[in-house]
Image (cartoon, grey):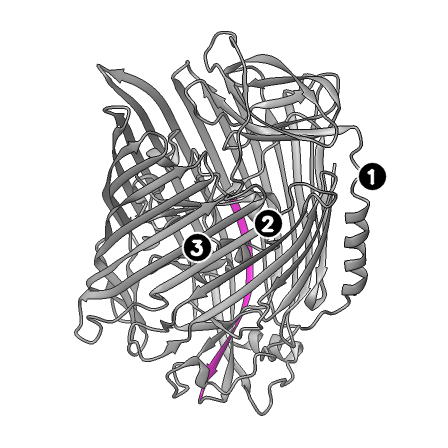
C-alpha cells in the first residue's frame, strides 16, 4: 500500500491522544438534537432554532432535523421561528456531556403557536427519506408511489468522501461510475437501471450537464429511480434510469461551522471549510459559505488533480411569509481525462489486455480544465395556510478546455495516443414556478402541484483531434512534449465547429388524492415543447404519470405501484450527405413493491420490481462515419432491495441489491436479444458502522463496506466483456462534539478493475488511505 508524504504512525498517535483526552473537552456543556414537525406530522424544514442569551443555534434541514452543540448546562430556553409559523419558546434542562434527543411538534397555522411538545425518539441516521424534491409535494416515503434513495451527510462523513464519484456509488443499482465525456465537460457518467445517466439536478433544478462539482456543500444526494420526465423534463436533466439531485447546505440562524484537513495516499492534500453566521441582530439575514481546495496525484505514474470550490449562500426572511435565497457555486477543475478504446485490440475481455495498472500512458502536462460559475435564486412565499408559491431562477456558465486522451489499442499491447481537444462553453438558464396547495373535495383530501418551467442551453464548441504517437507495454512511459503538442494542435484543422442552441418550455400538474387514511392515488401530466434552433427542429410531447399507495399499517408498511413516462427529444443527425430526423423516444415504466418503516424507525426497507420499455429507441452505429438510427425497442426490467437499519444504539447499516435484465427487444437482427452496453445484471452496495455510545471512548467507531458490480459488455454487439469487480473499504474514526478524526481505507484488497461507459473503459483507483481531522465550532 503506497502512502506518500504521510506518516501513518504519527497520525495514529494523534488519534490515541485525542481519544484519551476527550473527556477534557466539552466540560459543562451538552447537546440537543432532534426533528421538527408540523402539527400534521410533516417535517418542518428551515426552522430557525437558537438558545436565548447565547450565540448558539441552528436550522432544521429538509428532513426537519436539527442539532445544537456546546450548550451550557442548566435550564435553557430554546426558540423556534420560521416563515409561515409563529415564534415560540420552550425550556429544557441541559446536562453536562449528555445528548438530549428531542422531536419538536409545532402548530403550523397563521395564528400564534399554541404549544410545543417534546418527545424522546431514537434516530436512524442513515435514513433521511423525507424530501420536497422527489414529488415536489410534502409526501413521506411511505406514502410516495415512486422509489428513491437518499445518501445522507452522515453516511458521506463516515465514508470520508472527497469527490462526487465516491459518494454516488452508495445507492442501490448505481454502477460503472466514471469520468464522463461530452462537449468538453468532464462530469460523471454512470449506469442506473440499465441506462446511462449523469448528475444535472441541484435542489430540484437543472444545471449544466457533463460538468464536475465538489461535495463540500452537500447536505445529501437524492437518487430518484425510473423515467421521471413528467416532473423533471427532457433528457437535458434526466435519463430513463432516473434522476440524481444534489441537495445543498442552507444558512441557519446562528454562528457555527467547521474546518477539515485531509491527507493520505497519492500526495492528497485537501482542506474544506464551512462557515455560517447571521448578518443582523434580528437574524433575518443569514450567510453561509462552503469552500475546498483539493490537490492530489493520480494513483498511476502520471496525472495531477487540482480543484478549487467556493459556494456562498445568502438567506433573507423579511417576514413570516417570505423567504429569499441566493446561492452561488464556483468550481475550477484541472485533471487528466484518459479513455481506453479497445475496439481493434483483437481480444474479447479487458483482462486479456497486456496492461499494467501502474501506468497511465498519459502525462502530468496533458489535462482537461473546466471553470463553472453558477447562480441560483429562490423566492418562497406563504400565500395562505394551505398554499405556497416557489419561484426559482438558475443560471450556469461553464468554460471547458478538454484534452481527452484516447488510447486506441492496435493489438492487446500497443495503442495510439489520440488526443481530442474540445473547447466548449455551456450557458444554461432555467426558470421554474411552482404552486403547491391542499384542499378537500368532500371526504377526499388533496395535495396539488401546479408548475411551469423554461430551460435554455447554448453550447458553442470546437473539436480538433490527431494521433500524437504510439505507446504500449514495451514503452509505457513514452515522453510527452507539450510544445510539440501545441504545435501539432495549431496546425490541425478542427473536424467540427458549431453550437447547440436548445430550449424547452413545460407545464405540469400533479395531484395526490387521499381517498382514505390508508389509500392515496397520484395523477400527473406534463406537456413539453422542445426547440433546437440550430437543427431547425421542434417537438411537443405529453408525459403522464400515475401511482397508488395503500398503507397496510399506517405510517409503517405500504404497498405501491406506479406508471411513469420518460421522454427524450432527439435532435437531427447532420451527416455529410443528408440530415436524419427522429421521433421522440418514450420510456414507459410499470413498477410495484413494498415500503416499510418499522421498529420506531430502526428499520427502513424498500423492495420494488420494475419493467421499462423504450419505444423508438435510438442507437449509434458505425459505417463510413458514426451515425444514429431509430430502429427498435429496448427493455429493462429487474428488482431492487434497499435496507437501512439501526439494530442497536450506535450500530448502523445501509445495504442495497439490484438485479437488472436489459435487452434489445426489436430492431436489427444483429442486436435483438443482446444486452445494451455497460448494463450489468447484478450490483451490491453495503456499509455498516458501529460507534461506541457510552464509556470513556464514547464516539470511537469503525466501519466496513463493499461494492460489487457484475460483468458487462462494452458495446451493443456483446463481443467484448468488462469483468466483474468487488471493492472493499473500511474506516476508523473518533467523533467528538468539538472535533472529528478519521482514517479511511479504500479498496483494501487492491482490486484492479475497470469502469465501463460503453465504447470506452477507464481503470479505477487502487488501494488508498485517507486521514482527516475536522474541528467544529
Residue that badge 3 annotates:
198
State the residue position of label 1.
24
Residue 98 in view (yes/no): yes
What is the C-alpha distance between the residues marked 1 and 2?
Answer: 23 Å
Q: Which mark is residue 282?
A: none
Q: Which residues are magenta?
A: 396-410
- Horizontally, residue 607 falls left or right of residue 2, namely left
Residue 375 location, quadrant? top right
Q: Earlier in the sequence, mark 1 or mark 2?
A: 1
Q: What is the number of the mark on residue 690? A: 2
Residue 581 colored magenta? Answer: no
Q: Locate the N terminus and report the quarter of the image it occupies.
A: bottom right
Above or below residue 657? Residue 19 is above
Specify whether 281 is left or right of 17.
left
Residue 347: horizontal and vertical position, in percent? 39, 86
Rendering coords of residue 761 (x, y %): 45, 73
User: Pointer 1: residues within 10 angstroms few (<14), some, or many (20+)?
Assistant: few
Please identify the residue farthest to the front as the structure is shown: 695
84 versus 150 height, above or below: above
Amino acid at each position: 500500500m503506497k502512502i506518500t508524504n504521510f506518516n501513518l504512525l504519527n497520525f495514529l498517535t494523534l488519534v490515541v491522544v485525542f481519544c484519551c483526552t476527550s473527556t477534557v473537552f466539552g466540560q459543562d456543556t451538552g447537546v440537543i438534537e432532534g426533528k421538527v414537525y408540523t402539527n400534521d406530522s410533516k417535517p418542518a424544514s428551515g426552522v430557525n432554532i437558537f438558545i436565548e442569551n447565547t450565540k448558539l443555534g441552528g436550522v432544521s434541514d429538509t428532513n426537519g432535523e436539527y442539532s445544537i452543540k456546546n450548550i451550557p448546562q442548566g435550564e435553557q430556553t430554546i426558540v423556534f421561528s420560521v416563515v409561515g409559523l409563529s415564534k415560540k419558546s420552550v425550556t429544557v434542562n441541559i446536562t453536562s456531556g449528555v445528548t438530549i434527543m428531542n422531536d419538536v411538534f409545532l402548530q403550523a397555522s397563521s395564528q400564534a403557536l399554541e404549544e410545543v411538545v417534546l418527545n424522546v425518539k431514537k434516530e436512524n441516521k442513515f435514513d433521511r427519506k423525507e424530501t420536497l424534491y422527489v414529488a415536489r409535494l410534502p409526501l413521506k416515503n411511505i406514502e410516495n408511489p415512486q422509489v428513491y434513495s437518499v445518501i445522507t451527510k452522515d453516511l458521506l462523513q463516515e465514508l470520508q468522501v472527497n469527490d462526487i464519484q465516491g459518494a454516488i456509488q452508495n445507492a442501490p443499482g448505481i454502477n460503472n461510475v466514471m469520468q464522463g465525456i461530452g462537449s468538453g465537460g468532464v462530469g460523471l457518467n454512470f449506469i442506473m437501471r440499465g441506462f446511462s445517466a449523469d448528475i444535472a439536478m441541484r435542489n430540484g433544478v437543472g444545471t449544466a450537464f457533463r460538468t464536475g462539482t465538489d461535495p463540500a456543500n452537500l447536505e445529501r444526494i437524492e437518487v430518484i429511480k425510473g423515467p421521471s420526465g413528467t416532473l423533471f423534463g427532457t433528457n437535458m436533466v434526466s435519463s430513463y434510469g432516473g434522476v440524481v439531485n444534489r441537495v445543498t447546505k442552507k444558512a441557519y440562524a446562528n454562528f457555527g461551522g467547521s474546518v477539515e484537513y485531509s491527507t493520505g495516499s497519492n500526495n492528497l492534500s485537501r482542506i474544506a471549510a464551512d462557515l455560517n453566521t447571521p448578518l443582523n441582530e434580528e437574524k433575518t439575514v443569514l450567510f453561509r459559505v462552503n469552500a475546498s481546495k483539493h490537490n492530489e496525484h493520480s494513483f498511476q505514474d502520471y496525472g495531477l488533480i487540482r480543484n478549487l470550490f467556493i459556494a456562498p449562500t445568502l438567506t433573507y426572511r423579511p417576514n413570516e411569509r417570505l423567504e429569499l435565497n441566493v446561492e452561488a457555486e464556483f468550481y475550477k477543475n484541472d485533471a487528466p481525462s484518459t479513455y481506453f478504446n479497445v475496439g481493434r485490440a483483437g481480444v474479447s475481455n479487458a483482462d486479456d489486455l497486456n496492461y499494467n495498472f501502474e501506468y497511465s500512458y498519459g502525462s502530468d502536462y496533458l489535462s482537461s480544465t473546466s471553470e463553472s460559475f453558477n447562480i441560483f435564486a429562490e423566492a418562497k412565499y406563504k400565500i395562505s395556510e394551505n398554499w405556497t408559491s416557489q419561484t426559482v431562477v438558475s443560471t450556469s456558465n461553464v468554460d471547458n478546455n478538454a484534452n481527452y486522451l484516447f488510447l486506441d489499442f492496435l493489438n492487446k499491447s500497443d495503442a495510439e495516443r489520440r488526443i481530442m481537444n474540445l473547447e466548449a462553453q455551456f450557458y444554461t438558464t432555467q426558470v421554474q414556478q411552482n404552486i403547491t396547495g391542499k384542499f378537500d373535495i368532500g371526504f377526499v383530501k388533496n395535495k396539488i402541484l401546479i408548475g411551469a418551467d423554461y430551460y435554455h442551453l447554448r453550447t458553442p464548441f470546437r473539436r480538433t483531434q490527431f494521433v500524437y504517437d504510439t505507446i504500449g507495454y514495451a514503452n509505457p512511459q513514452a515522453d510527452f512534449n507539450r510544445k510539440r503538442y501545441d504545435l501539432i494542435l495549431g496546425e490541425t484543422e478542427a473536424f467540427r465547429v458549431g453550437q447547440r442552441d436548445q430550449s424547452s418550455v413545460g407545464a405540469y400538474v400533479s395531484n395526490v388524492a387521499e381517498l382514505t387514511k390508508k389509500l392515496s392515488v397520484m395523477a400527473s401530466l406534463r406537456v413539453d415543447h422542445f426547440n433546437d434552433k440550430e437543427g431547425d427542429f421542434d417537438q411537443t410531447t405529453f408525459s403522464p404519470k400515475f401511482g397508488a399507495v395503500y398503507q397496510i399499517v399506517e405510517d409503517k408498511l405500504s404497498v405501491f405501484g406506479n406508471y411513469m413516462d420518460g421522454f427524450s427529444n432527439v435532435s437531427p443527425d447532420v451527416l455529410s450527405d443528408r440530415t436524419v430526423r427522429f421521433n421522440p423516444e418514450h420510456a414507459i415504466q410499470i413498477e410495484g413493491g413494498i415500503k416499510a418503516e418499522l421498529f420506531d424507525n430502526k428499520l427502513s426497507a424498500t423492495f420494488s420490481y420494475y419493467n421499462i420499455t423504450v419505444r423508438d429507441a435510438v442507437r449509434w452505429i458505425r459505417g463510413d462515419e458514426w451515425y444514429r438510427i431509430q430502429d427498435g425497442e429496448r427493455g429493462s426490467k429487474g428488482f431492487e432491495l434497499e435496507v437501512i437499519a439501526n439494530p442497536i444504539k450506535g450500530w448502523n447499516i445501509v445495504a442495497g441489491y439490484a438485479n437488472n435484465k436489459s435487452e434489445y427487444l426489436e430492431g436489427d437482427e444483429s442486436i435483438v436479444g443482446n444486452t445494451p452496453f455497460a448494463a450489468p445484471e447484478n450490483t451490491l452496495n453495503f456499509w455498516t458502522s458501529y460507534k461506541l455510545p457510552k464509556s470513556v471512548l464514547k464516539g470511537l467507531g469503525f466501519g466496513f463496506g463493499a461494492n460489487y458490480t457484475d460483468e458487462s459488455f462494452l458495446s451493443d454487439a456483446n463481443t467484448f466483456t468488462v469483468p466483474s469487480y468487488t471493492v472493499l473499504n473500511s474506516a476508523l474514526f473518533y467523533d467528538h462534539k468539538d472535533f472529528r478524526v478519521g482514517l479511511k481505507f479504500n479498496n483494501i484488497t487492491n482490486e484492479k478493475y475497470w469502469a465501463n461507459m460503453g465504447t470506452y473503459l477507464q481503470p479505477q483507483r487502487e488501494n488508498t488511505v485517507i486521514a482527516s481531522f475536522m474541528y467544529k465550532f
